[in-house]
Amino acid sequence: MKAKIRGTEIYFDVAGMQMAPEANNTLVEKPVLFLIHGGPGGNHTRFKFNSIDLQKYAQLIFIDQRGCGWSKKTKPSDYTLENNIEDIEALREYLGFKKISILGVSYGGMVAQGYAIKYAKNIDKLILVVTAPSYHFMEESKNNLQKIGTKQQIEICDKFLWNGTFKNNKDAEDYFRVLDPLYFYKKPKKRDIKAKYLTGNVGQLNVLSYEVLNVGFGTFLRKFNFIPKLHKITCPTLILAGKNDWICSANQSKILAKGIKGSILKIFPNCGHAIASDANKAYLKAVTHFLKQKA
């Protein structure tokens, strides 16, 4: 499905009922949970493998950010953090929800923070997974890579990632083939590896937009800073981090927890950036428990 909003087309998909039947012929209203993918330049498909069980407790709205996945491709200047935030608000209005909850992973967590800061009145609960509140994460991840990365991993990040200089799909595929061992603490299943770097048609698990990735690492990820505004996030907030995450370290999640009053921080041991894969059961349990709690 696609929503025509803000001069573009945003792809979304839905799993689970909002008004769900229960015993004694009653209906129970479940929360609406927007799932925001990372990247920049990723898409929603990984959620359908690692988070689909959450539909038992919430109506899930999977979203491809503008220029990503099956959303409309536009000009690079459109691929901004601000537009990603405003697209979430426009989609909320388009779908007619008074309030939403958001689960944002990695860069998606940055979008989620921006939304919760600007549209506090429209959000019920916030779940921030392996993310960071400012551009400072990049310098820390560079230092982490120097400590734990191989020569090849360091070189390919210098060549493509830090300056946003991927030239084509092959460059992106090469990057993820080399860096996958750092994103996962546990060796992923073969399907998970393919989902990381395949590009192309709808039949494939993942469509990566290297153009969007370039804009992010080449421009706004170098300067965004939500730390002075984190106090504006007033909804119940759950923060999940991987102890062995190299690119959005647990230290970044600690900064988030310090800035968001009343937030809950959980750091998963033996987990990298892909905690929903490394510790899927624990991840689902933490999110489920949080969703079931009364706000």
Image: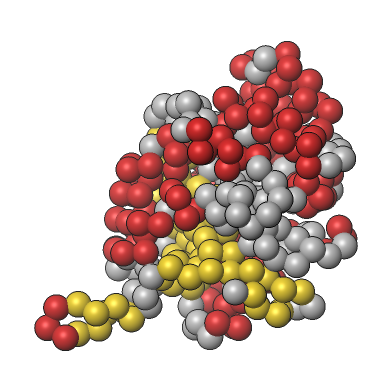
Quadrant into which the N terminus falls: bottom right
**Between 250 and 65, which is closer to the camera in this rendering?**
65
Apparent side of residue 229 relative to residue 25 in the rendered image (left or right): right
Residue 261 at least partly seen: no
Dividing the picture into quadrants, the one containing residue 4 is: bottom right
The quarter holding residue 3 reads bottom right
Taking 30 as reference, is 178 left or right? right
Q: Please, is residue 86 above or below residue 226 in the view?
A: below
- Which quadrant of the view contains residue 283? top left
Q: How many marks?
A: 0
Q: Position of residue 39 (x, y in %)?
A: 67, 47
Q: Position of residue 186 (x, y in %)?
A: 45, 27
Residue at figure coordinates x 42%, y 62% from the top left: 236
Residue farthest along the left direction in this orientation: 24
Q: Is residue 131 left or right of residue 199?
A: left
Residue at the spot 33% in from the left edge and 81% down from the top edge:
19
> Residue placed at 57% from the left, 78% from the top?
92
Q: Is residue 85 visible?
A: yes
**Residue 68 at x, y = what percent?**
71, 58
- Percent of width and height locating residue 113: 59, 58
